[in-house]
Amino acid sequence: MSEPDVPRQDLSRLNSVDRISIFVGEKISIVFLISVVFTAYEVIMRYVFNAPTIWVHDSAAALSATGFLLAGTYAMQANRHMRITVVYDIMPKKIQRILDFVQHIFILFFMTLFTYACWKLAVPAVTLMETSAHAWDVPIPAYLKALMVLASGLMLVQAISQLRDDIKKIREVL
Amino acid sequence: MSIEILTLIMLAAMMGLMVIGLPLVFVTGVVSLAFALALYGPMSLTLISSRVYSFVSVYALVAVPMFVLMASILERSGVAKDLFKAMHIFAGGLKGGLAIQTMAVAVLMAAMTGIIGGEIVLLGLVALPQMLALKYDRKLAIGTICAGGSLGTMIPPSIVLIFFGLTASVSIGELFMATIIPGLLLAGLYVLYILIRCHINPELGPPAPIEERDLPLREKLILFRDVAMPLSVAVMVLGSIYGGIASVSESAGMGVIGVLISAKIRKELSWEMLRGALIQTTMTCAVILWLTFGANALIGVYNLMGGIDFVRELISGLPFPPMVIIILMMLILVVLGFFIDWIGIMLLTMPIFVPIIIAMGYSPIWFGILFCMNMQISYLSPPFGPAAFYLKGVAPPEISLQDIYASLWPFMILQIIGIGLVMYFPQLALWLPDYVYNS
Amino acid sequence: AAPEHNWKVQSFWSPGSVNMKVFQRFAKNVGDMSNGRIKITPLPIGAVVGHTETLDAVAAGILQGHHSGGAYFAGKEPAFQICNELNGAFDNTYQHQLWFEHGGGLALCRELYAKFGAFYVGPVWFGGESMPSKNRLDTVASFKGVKMRSPEGMGASIWRRIGAGVVTLPGSEVFTALERGVIDATDWGTLGMNQDLGYHKIAPFPLYPGFHSAPASEIAINLGIWNKLPADLKAIMVFAVKEFSRDMKQTIEMVDLEAANQAEKQGITLVNWSKEERGKFRAIAMLEWEAWAKKSPMARKIVDSQVAFLRKLKLIN
Ligand code: NA
Ligand code: NA
């Protein structure tokens, strides 16, 4: 599936957490273009010059992974993560606000524990500077594991910010 | 607690969280974390981050954003409109011609993109208004667009098959080969259905007025030039795979280069356009990938609980002949397709189904195609029908989601017929890869 | 009675594969030998964690053990690769086993794994890798400019050293790439496995018997659990792993033998390297061993031990 186009949001109406999420999501999208360019380079080097590189595949994979991970908070801010809303949609406004709040409690639970789990994974990897042990022997595993902490940390902050908004909205409807 | 009871609790918890509208990544995420924590303690939480890490660092995933990017750039160009115009000249005069032409455009677009969504949106914007203006039957028009647009993952390239190849460790190139005939078969069934319905009742799909179709030769030639460009993109992707130039993942990159060049020649390429396409790609990938993270975490925890053996024994312990077991699997996939998206279904079921299929002596390639066809149903089936959601986003406001779903069931029946045919005649899927690889 | 020890042990084999079945036999043997006191649940690749992450999972106690190969963990400590294998070093797994049992190999690998929270119970061989190729590759020189797929690691680096162009491909894409000519050869499974996958039809010059790679995988158990095991269960595990290795090696050998016997009928040419060319390969491989030895003190120690043993065997000067 592909997401419908992403409308530009009016940044002035958003809080700083939202703005960071949008900034990260929009800026990080460049990694996908870079990985296209790298891939084309590899194909030409190999097919035309019979000289495959040792770094294109690993770096393209790391770039894509960077995009996937950091975009999590972008989708969260835009409320695009896939959900089933048949029941939610038929509920009255008041109940929907409460459900929003309950949802964000669960999201907060997940993001807190997940960030902790990423941290536990990253510490030994970064301490050892874990590498791929490939011919291009660079610490991609250490980098990606550290990046997971950043990505989930950003989502955690985003979740807290959204929970705060929910509470405000509940006060408004009650 | 026994695995049976734990499984039930897990399912109930997931249902509950889904019903309140929690995004699916968090439904699966929360359930897996809670079970890991409760059954194995805090030390086990890294199992979840570890699985996400392993999944995200798989090289073959680079093809996913690339195929999405191709679709996003195509969406921003006038290619779809031009394709549609060109087809109009040929098919506009037929009863139901506009619908058939929509299907033809859908197949061509499907050969250029690996996902659904963009295609449905495009057809919804280009073809739906024209069919409605011609007083087409609304249901037939909607069904044509949703079913046709869904072919994006059925005709190669296909992200569904990339993920299947990764999950089942089978050749993605062979899967791409194998899906061509079944994909065209589905499209053929749709066309046949449209023709028959419009033949019986011409009111459903009146032909277009002659003046719309009769263009001077020069304009016809220009249309052909515009159409040649996108077709070369498809050639670039599949040609680089089958010409021995690039691997499947790399061919996705070649495809992006192809659309960029064709957009440049069509004078549509700008930094602003590319930027929009990249941002949309990022959003789409975020949604697809985070969904898989959640499903992946859940599978890890469930396997640790002994889930693999439990489900395998549950299925293979059934006193049925193999074909019945396969039909049963298909039914499970259909039922799951009501509620969750293809990637969740794949991650949940394929690690269990594929070994059983192999053990029963069937081809996993063939089963991959059956799975892919089954997911075509899942796009259309309510309440969670992505194809319907995408069309709703661009359809006139008086068309409700209920209207859309009500239009889709005849096409779902056609899909079931298609699955039945490929099931009964495996050669529909296996002949082409066999011919290509073993001759 | 309920087992005293209930272990989840994740392997690096695909579900339903011959190797997985042998692993399941091992799990059953341990149960029988210990009279049900140890129950091993054998898990296929990726069941609980990814195949490069099992060592961490064993150390954390998420898994109680794994059946995997050290090369997957070489990014944490290069010495893991050396315990797995020095590519091109021994002529056969029997010699490799001699080093483990009489050349100090086992003690060194146990020392290494203990640093990462796991006990290295013993090595498990699964046979020599074959290498399907579209053309006859029977000398070091014939590899010049050959496009091949190889899993990254020491093996891939040696192929590069002898002039091959190594292409990274996901496993699931290898067949298509080979068939279409994106690559000319692939450093892939054992002969029988490849025959099953149909490689002989598109690449009819498999290297057999393979000499470039016959890695020792292993069974490793969480160190805390191991240390608390009573002596009888420890002995049962050690002996069961030895039997497991024999069973795995011989099962695969028979499958390979059947495949080799059918080769001629199928129009396949089995490519066996001469002693002289093997020597040339080993000489170049030694440069790569030395490069790995420089990566860490522990790697140095294990490479030196193995090289000394190879001298004793007169495989190198
Ligand atoms: Na497609
Ligand atoms: Na559905």
Image (spheres, coloured by chain):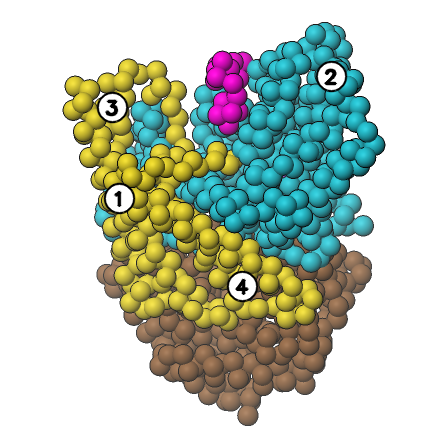
Q: Which residue is mark 3?
A: A97
Residue found 60% across the figure and 59% down from its top? A40
Q: Residues within 10 Å of mark 2 (few under 14, many from 20)?
A: many
Residue B273 in the image: x percent, y percent? 53, 44
Q: Which chain is cyan?
A: B
Quarter containing the N terminus of chain B: top left
Q: Which residue is mark 1?
A: A17
- Which residue type carries mark 4? Val
Looking at marks 3 and 4 on the same chain, the residue that comes earlier in the sequence is marked by 4
Foreground mark, 2 or 3?
2
Identify the subunit bearing mark 2: B
| Quarter holding residue A162 | top left
Estimate the spatial distance between the alpha carbons at disc 4 and disc 2, rounded to whole Å: 51 Å
Q: Which chain is brown?
A: C
In the image, the segment drawn in magenta is B390-406
Q: Residues within 10 Å of mark 4 (few under 14, many from 20)?
A: many
Q: Which residue is mark 2?
A: B208
Estimate the spatial distance between the alpha carbons at disc 2 and disc 1, rounded to whole Å: 53 Å
